[in-house]
Image (cartoon, grey):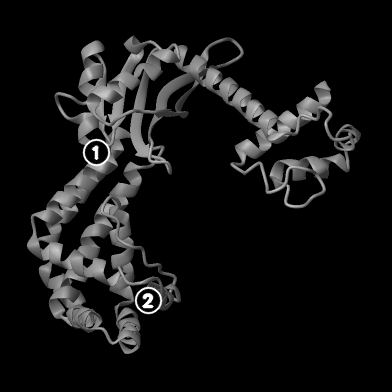
Amino acid sequence: WRQVIDHIVNINLTLAMSNLAFRGHRGIIGEGNIGNFLSIVELLAKYDPLLEELIRKPKGLTMYLSPKIQNKIIQLLSDQVTESIVNDIKNTPFYSVILDTTQDLSKVNQLSQVFQYVTIEKDEKGNPAKININESLLGFHEVSGQSGTNLEGDIKCIKDKGLELSKLRGQGYDGAANMSRMYSGVQVRIAEKELNTRYVHCAAHNLNLVLNDSVRTVTELQNFYGLVETLFGHSINQWALLSSFVSKFGLTLKRLCPKCWSSHYDSLVALRYRYRDILKALSQIILKTNKPEDSSLHKHLESFNVILMIVFQTKVLETINVVSKMLQSETQELGKAAEMLENAYNLMKDLRNSFSNIRQLAVKVA
């Protein structure tokens, strides 16, 4: 039985590491659509006498193949991995935590817990040989609310894992008010208990907030992105037609997302370099729908001011998009990030003196 259980545990581990579903519509081998777990057991049984003997056992006998046993094995594997990570964190002098909340499909708030820490590999003589920077997700924790008070109460998940709050040196959130505001945010409540803990605002999220605020203060930009949103807000069939015109040239259209400015850049690139094709697609939509709003949209897109804004905003977001992507890199260093932001700032200032060049590009597009 030990060998059988060893086989089953390894199958569970393989599926879990590959992020594959376990179960299918049937739970009995030989009935069809039995899912990945039982399919692998059935396959290996062709080459493994132990598993072959197992699946030939009469119904009702212990086989360790039920969904209940699978869940227990998954939980045991999860506990073992968590224990290993927690032990690594305990053995480090300092660690940082990154927390964020999101709603699952059942509308329950889930708090994600990511820990950053350093491990030191030693050589045969016991001397430090290599330093590894680790970032580990230790699961999700259900929270009752999103106020700073509720979330701070749930930070006990750190202590529940046996981790010392005195070793906490960094905390990072996305900048939402309940997580970062000065008086009732989590970061202040944690800092009250551990003075050496420093708060770091998510750099990519911070950049996104700057962009949102910039757009809100310029009426022309609000109107322009409202126009682009209208263009990309067509029905599924019309969206498919627009996308088909653009995809022929290796570009893709992405619907605008207020929390993700990379979607704005991708859409503007397609609009900038396939401008004529998008107008043709829009003309076809007008012929099919004969809607006044589509004709008005087509007319606005043909105006030189909109074309000029397309070229200008593509230039602006091109500079910002590079920085935004790099800020999210796992290997990004603080000094390099500061240098990139400085370069982006200087490039943006240079654009103020490049109006004539941008206008010439807009004329070519028109």
Residue 12, numbered label:
none
First-in-chain label (2 vs 1): 2
Residue 104 against residue 320 in the figure, above or below: above
Residue 319 against residue 292 in the figure, above or below: above
Q: Are marks 2 and 1 in contact (CB under 8 Å)?
A: no
Tell whether 208 sits left or right of 237: left
Q: Amino acid at mark 2?
A: Gln
The reply to whether residue 92 is visible in this rendering is no
Q: Residue 112: horizontal and vertical position, in percent?
A: 40, 31
Q: Give the Cα distance between marks 2 and 1.
A: 43 Å
Q: Quadrant of residue 221?
A: bottom left
Q: Quadrant of residue 54?
A: top right
Q: Residue at x 26, y 83 (%)?
A: 291
Residue 97 against residue 11 in the figure, above or below: above
Q: Residue at x 13, y 58 (%)?
A: 350
Q: Residue at x 80, y 30 (%)?
A: 63
Residue at numbered disc 1 = 338
The reply to whether residue 117 is visible in this rendering is yes
Residue 238, numbered label:
2
Which structural element holds mark 1?
Answer: helix
User: Quarter of the image containing the N terminus?
Assistant: top right
Q: Amino acid at mark 1?
A: Ala
283 or 71, nearer to the observer: 71
Tell whether 167 sits left or right of 127: left
Q: Residue 93: horizontal and vertical position, in percent?
A: 40, 12
80 or 262, nearer to the observer: 80
Q: Residue 251: horizontal and vertical position, in percent?
A: 40, 69
Residue 30 against residue 251 in the figure, above or below: above
